[in-house]
Image (tube, rainbow, N blue to C red):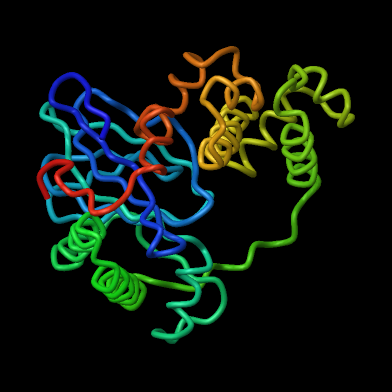
Amino acid sequence: MARARDGEWARHWHYPAVPGLDLLRARYVRHSFVRHSHEGFVLGAVRQGVEDVVTPHGTLHAGRGSVVMLNPEVPHSAHAGDPDGWSYATLYPSLDLVAAIAAEETTLRGTPSFAETIVEDEDTALLIRAVHRAAEEGNALAADSLLRVTLARLLRRHGTALTVRAPRDAGAVTAARARDLLHRRMADPPSLEQLARELDTGSFALLRAFKAAYGMPPHTWLTDARIRAARRLLEAGTPPAAAAAEVGFTDQPHLNRHFTRIVGVPPGAYQRERARTYKTGGAGPH
């Protein structure tokens, strides 16, 4: 568990007995999450305080008993909405896990998603915390069962089928080409001007198209992509300094700063949790 100033603490981990799920339990006061997105879903239950979640549609306030539901690849940031910060338990279920439960337990057809970002749903918030408790106690049967009940309930109450997007215009095609190029050259990316020149467009036109397609400018997207790549390296056992160099950060402190502002814990703490054995309770109040 990572502990910091002002009584902040956080634990971001994976319980191997329940595939397709990461967990974060934390109390944050001065910490803030910079703009980023996730490959899978984010389902957070606020226990105390207020979390402000900044989405493409504005800032939303999540208080005690609220459940925050973020769909994959939705850009967002977050910070305390109260001087005393907030504490919460968050589940990060994979796309495949949510899709399988939606197909088995709901009438949703197509790609499942959530229609709202924040809802008052205290009984489901308690279930999310119960998933954490069971996992921390090493109770695989309870953790898996409670997770499936939680996801099925959220999908029935707040789920919808993802709307099919309209055909992409020329700007979206250019943005996708820019994204692919940045991903291939993550460790040594071009400047904005060089990138625009390679794509035969203007710098400002590229900025507008990229932000319209992905909700953030290219440099912000690249930092997020580097952190995703660094997470995979850390999970495979790569030392943080080597992971930093491989994905294009200047050094390990550079990785530490960006990693913590996106994931919520430093890379060393993140990697250590992947190596821990279970049962591992006691990370803070439930």
Using the image, determine if residue 173 lies above or below residue 84: below
Q: Nearer the viewer, residue 13 or 108?
A: 13
Image-quadrant location for residue 80? top left
Residue drawn where x is 36% and y is 56% of the image:
15
Count up the numbered dots.
Answer: 0
Query: Relative to residue 199, is residue 42 drawn left or right?
Result: left
Measured from the top left, where is residue 22 in percent x and y? 39, 52
Q: Nearer the viewer, residue 104 or 160?
A: 104
Residue drawn where x is 59% and y is 27% of the image:
243
Q: Nearer the viewer, residue 35 or 215?
A: 35
Measured from the top left, where is residue 56 in percent x and y? 46, 43
Using the image, determine if residue 285 lies above or below residue 178: below
Q: Quadrant of the N terminus?
A: top left
Measured from the top left, where is residue 136 in percent x and y? 23, 54
Using the image, determine if residue 216 lies above or below residue 5: below
Query: Relative to residue 181, is residue 99 drawn left or right?
Result: left
